[in-house]
Amino acid sequence: MSGERPENGGGRPENGGGRLLDRRGFLKVSAGAAGGLLIAFEAGPWLGAKASGFDGRTAAATGAASSTGAAGHQAELKPNPFLAVAADGTVTIWAKNPEIGQGVKTALPMIVAEELGVDWESVRVVQADLDPAFGDQSAGGSDGVRSNWNRLREAGAMGRTLLVAAAARRWGVEPGGCAAEHGSVRHLASGRRLSYGELAAAAAGMPVPDSVELEEPRDFHVVGTPRRGVDTPAITTGSLVYGLDVRQPGMLFAAVAKPPVFGGTLARFDAAPALAVPGVRQVVRIDGLPNPTQLLPGVAVVADSTWAALRGREALAVEWTAGPGAAESTSALLQQCEELSRRPGKVLREEGDAEAALAGAAVRLEAVYTVPFLAHAALEPVNCTAAVGDGRCEIWGPLQDPGGARRLAALLTGLPRESIAVHLTRAGGGFGRRLMSDFAAEAVVIARAAGRPVQVVWTREDDLRHDYYRPAGYHHLRAGLDRAGRLVAWTHHLVNPSRYEFRRDPAPPDASEMYADDFPAGFVPNFRAEHTAVRTQIPTGPWRATLHSANAFAVQGFLDEVAAAARRDPLELRRELLGPPREVPYANYGGPRFDTGRLRAVLDLAAARAGWGKPLPPGRGRGIACNFTFGSYAAHVAEVSVDERGAVEVHRLVAAVDCGTAVNPAGVEAQVAGGTLDGLNAALQAEITVAAGRTEQSNFHDYLLLRHPEAPPVEVAIVPSRERPTGMGEIAVPTVGPAVANAIFAANGRRVRRLPLRGQDLRPAAAAAARQDAAIGNGPFRER
Amino acid sequence: MPGRQAITLEVNGAARRAEVDAETPLLWVLRDTFGLTGTKYGCGVAQCGACTVHLDGAAVRSCVMPVAAASGRRVTTIEGLSRDGRHPLQLAWIEEDVPQCGYCQAGQIMAAAALLSQLPHPSEPQIAEALAGNLCRCGTYARIRRAVRRAAATVESGR
C-alpha cells in the first residue's frame, strides 16, 4: 500500500488497466460442452487448470472453466474472470490484488457483489493468482479500489445482465420488467422469481451484451456498508496461510548471507563449516543483479529446516568487499544535504518572484525540517517460496508486485512468462517493502540450484538491515508575510536521496521525492519548489504514503510557524489560503485535480470533532494538519501535553478523511486508525541510522514500534460521499506528525522541526524565546 | 555442534516426538517439524510476541525457548486453543473484526487467553500491560482490547 503507480518493480503493469467493456477480448465467449459460458485460457501448464485463466485469444478446455470444483458437469455462469455463478447457487468472486492488510480482498469483491445483485453473505471469495486476465495486480499507490472501481462494477453488472436476460427469455417477458435482487431475478408484474443458480446455465448461453447498466449509488446494498474481513475467521484459528506458511512437498529452507555494507560485494566464502551443520544440504552462491532493488549478491545456506539454515548461515565463513559504502553514515549524509541546500536545486515549480517578495516582506521566516530513514518492518519478515525445473517456475509468496516477481523470474531463468506461475499468499503487512521482488528473485535462484522447492526466510535482522528505506530528508523552507500578515512568498528546497535514482528508474530523481503541486503551491503568489538529489549507497524505496510522509511534516509544520508569526489561528490560516471551494489542477500522482472545498471540509470536520478552539488546561495543546494525496483528503487534530521534563503525552488523535465512496466503511476506519498510529510511531520514535555503511538497528528492541500501552485512542470521521472512491491505505499517515508537532508548540512553545521526537529536548520554551522563535524561524535568514 | 536428540512433548493434546537439535527453538519445531504454522515468527528474540504459545497454560515466547525446555510438558498453540475455533476470544476477535494483516493476531489471542485464565475480568490498563509484549504493526490495538473485554464479558455471562 505504498508507492506511486510507476513503483511496480520498475516496469509497467502486466496488462493495461482499461475498462472492462473496452477490452473486446474480454467479451469473446463461447458455449462449451458443459453448457457453461466459457472464456478463453492462457495455455500455461498451471494456468489452464485455474479459474481465472483468460487472455481473450482462444476458447479452450471446457471443464477447466469451473473454479468451483464442479469441473465439467455443472453448468456455470462465468462471464469474466472476476465471478462465477454455479448451478447450486454458489457465487464465487475472485479477489484480484494482493492482500497485505489493506483490506482489498474484501473491498474489491464487495464491488462485484454489489452490481451482481447478490447478498454479501452468500459470496465465496477466492484469492486470484497472477494472471493477465485481471489486469494490473499490484498493491501500491493506494489504487486498488480506485483503479478497479469501474471494471469491477462492470464485471458484476455483466453477470447480472446475463442472469436477468435468461430469466426474461424463460418467462417470455422484457428484461426491463425484471429486477435482480438477493441472488435472484424477479418479474415485477407477476412476482415470479428464479434464483441465480437456476438461471446460471441459461445465462451462460445468452449473448453477451454490448453495454451494461450500472446501479444508482442510492441503491447500493453492499458498497457503503461495513463488512468484516473475509479472512478474519481463518486468522483467528491460525489456519490462514501467509507466505512463511507455504509448505510444498520436498521443500527446503534457505537463509542468505548478504553484504553487511551497502553496495558491498562477495569476495570469497568457505561452505564447509556450514555444510557441517546437521540438516544443511547445500550452499549456493548468489550473483546479484546490477540493479540493487532486484537482487543482492549473497551466499545461501539451504537446509531441511529454518533453524538448520540459520545455524548454517552463522557457521558460514564469508569475506566481503565493502566498497565505497563503508564510509557512509546518516550524520555525514545530513551534513552533505545541508551543504547542497545552499546551492540551487532543480526548480520543480515557480510562480512570481519569491526572492523579491522575500526581500520586501514585512516578516520573513526560515526553518529547516529534517526526517530520518524509516524501515518498513512488516511483522511477517520478508520471505518467498519457489520451485524451478522441467521448463517451469512456480512462486508462492507475500508479494505486492507479483508481476514484477514474474519479470525477475523470467530474467533469471530465461523462461517465458507463460511458464512462470505466481501464487499470492496473504502478506503480514507490506507498507511498500514488498513492491520490490528481490526476495522472490532470491528464492528462484536458490530453488533452481537446489532442484527442489525452497522457502527463503529473512530474519528480522535481515529485514531491518537490508530494507529499502523511506528516504531521509533535509527541507529548507522560507516564507514572507506582508504587513497585513498575508503569506506572500514561500520557498521549499528538499535535499534527499532519490529512490528512483537508487533503483535506476528513467524518471527524474525528484519525481519520487517532491510533488510540485502539493499545497501550498498555487495558493501563494510568489512560490518556488526545488529538489536536489544526494547520492548514497543507502538503499531507498517506497514507504507507506511515499514522501508525503515527510513533506507534509515540513510543509504543515512551517505553515504553523507562518500562522504563529502572523498571529493567526492555524486552522483559519489554512482555510483562508485554500479559499472558496473549487477544483484546481494537480499534476502529480492522485490528480489531475484537487478540490479545495473537500480539503477544507476535512479540516473543519477534524476540528469540530476535536473541539478546536475550546480551552485546554495549561501545558496542553492542539495541533492541526491537512494533506491531499492519492486522490483523497485527510486532516488530523492532535491533543498533547508536555510536562516540565519534556515528556510528551498524546491524549487524543482525531482523523477526518474524504476518500469518496467508502466501499467498506469498516475497512476505511481500520486503515485510518492504523495509519494514524503508523504516522504517530514515525513521529515519536522510528528512525534508522547508518554508521560505517551499515544500519545500526537490528530488531524491535532498537527499531521501536508502538506497543499496547503507548497507543492512544484514535477517533475517525469519514466524510459521507458518493464521489468515486479514491486512495485509502496511506492517506492517514502524513498529517499525524505535523499535527503532533504543532500541538507541542501550542502546548509549550517548543517548535519541533526534526523527527522523531525521541531524544529531543521538548521542555517548555521560555516565553520570550518562544515568541522570537515564532517570529523569525529557527535560524539566521540566509541570502541566496 | 549439539547433536540431534529425541524429544517428546504434548502438543494440543497429542503426544508428539521430534528428533532435532535440542537447542532448536520450540517455534521452529512447531512450524517446520509438526507443520503447525499458526504460530508465527516475527523477531526471534522475544520482542514481538507473534510466536506466543502456552506452556502448561502459561504464555511463553516459543522463538527463544529451546525445544528441550518443553520436553515432557504441555504445549498449546493457536490451532489447539479450541476444538472448533469458538473460544470466546476467537469469537470476540471475529465479532470485533480485529485483524488487518492479521499476522500478529494468533500471538495476541494466545497472550490474551493466558491473561483471562489468570485474570478473568481485566481492566483496560491490565489488558494493555499484559499484551505490551505483543506488537501489532497495523495498529489494531484498540480493537484487540475491545475484543478481550468482549470475551471476558461473554465468559462472565456464561455466553
Image (tube, coloured by chain):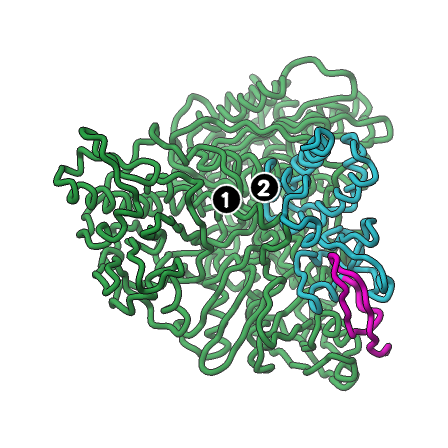
Examine the rendering and report whether any part of residue A51 can be seen.
yes
Q: Which residues are magenta?
A: B1-26
**Dot 1: chain letter:** A
Q: How many marks?
A: 2
Chain A drawn colour: green
Cβ atoms under marks 2 and 1 closer than 8 Å: yes
Q: What residue is drawn where x is 42% and y is 21%?
A: A580
Report x, y in % for residue A32. Answer: 23, 63
Element assignment for label 1: loop
Q: In the visual, does A368 lie left or right of A213?
A: right
Q: Is residue A241 left or right of residue A697?
A: left
Tell me which chain appears cyan: B
**Numbered circle sitting on residue A515:** 1
Quarter in which the N terminus of chain B is drawn: bottom right
Q: Quadrant of the C terminus of chain B?
A: top right
Q: CA distance from mark 2 to mark 1?
A: 9 Å
Residue A69 lies in quadrant: bottom left
**Is residue A220 one of those drawn in magenta?**
no
Query: Residue visible at 38% across and 59% down?
Result: A67
Does residue A477 appear in the picture of this structure? no
Label ID, residue A383: none
A641 or B22, which is in the foreground? B22
Residue A616 falls in image quadrant: top right
Q: Is residue A572 above or below residue A313?
A: above
